[in-house]
Image (cartoon, grey):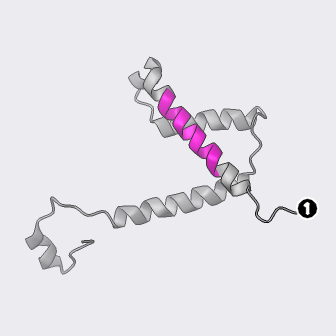
Amino acid sequence: MNAPFEFNSMLVFAWLSFFLIMGLYLRARVAFIQKFLFPSCLVGGFAGLVAMQTGLLNIETDALENFGYHFFNVSFISVGLTRNDAEDEAGAKIAGVKGPA
């Protein structure tokens, strides 16, 4: 019986989410990581790298590349759509561009 839908992308997303949450937890609990101001996403990414290189986790690199590509694009799009409330309205009207409302 064939599966009606490939769940590989959902599993990759679940593992990425798990490692990000694990990075948040380790950042909150380990004093060494807090002292040197390591970001939680870096800690989680390093934990995922260790899990992949030791063979505990088998994720195809193509799937990670696809997720990285799309998340990177979404992050840049969201920066452009962010509204700046502190911006002077007169300055925005002079430039002719008001920005997102």
Q: Position of residue 27 (x, y in %)?
A: 46, 28
- Residue 25 vs 31, above or below: the answer is below
Say whether residue 79 is left or right of residue 64.
Answer: left
Q: Is residue 43 visible?
A: no
Q: Position of residue 44 (x, y in %)?
A: 56, 36
Q: Secondary structure at mark 1?
A: loop
**What amino acid type is highlighted by mark number 1?**
Met
Tag count: 1
- Residue 53 vs 67, above or below: the answer is above
Q: Position of residue 40 (x, y in %)?
A: 47, 35
- Closest to the observer, 96 or 29: 29
- Residue 59 vs 84, above or below: the answer is above
Tell me which segment is drawn in magenta: 13-25
- Closest to the observer, 24 or 47: 24
- Say which quadrant the C terminus sits in: bottom left
Quadrant of the image occupied by residue 94: bottom left
Q: Residue farthest to the left? A: 90
Indicate yes or no whether the magenta region holds residue 21.
yes
Q: Residue farthest to the bottom? A: 96
Indicate yes or no whether the magenta region holds residue 43.
no
Say whether residue 88 is left or right of residue 78.
Answer: left
Q: Residues within 10 Å of mark 1 (few under 14, many from 20)?
A: few
- Name the residue beneath numbered marker 1: 1
- Say which quadrant the N terminus sits in: bottom right
Q: Position of residue 41 (x, y in %)?
A: 50, 40
Residue at 11% of width from left, 70% of height from top?
89
Q: Residue farthest to the top? A: 31
Residue at 58% of width from left, 60% of height from top?
69
Q: Is residue 14 visible?
A: yes
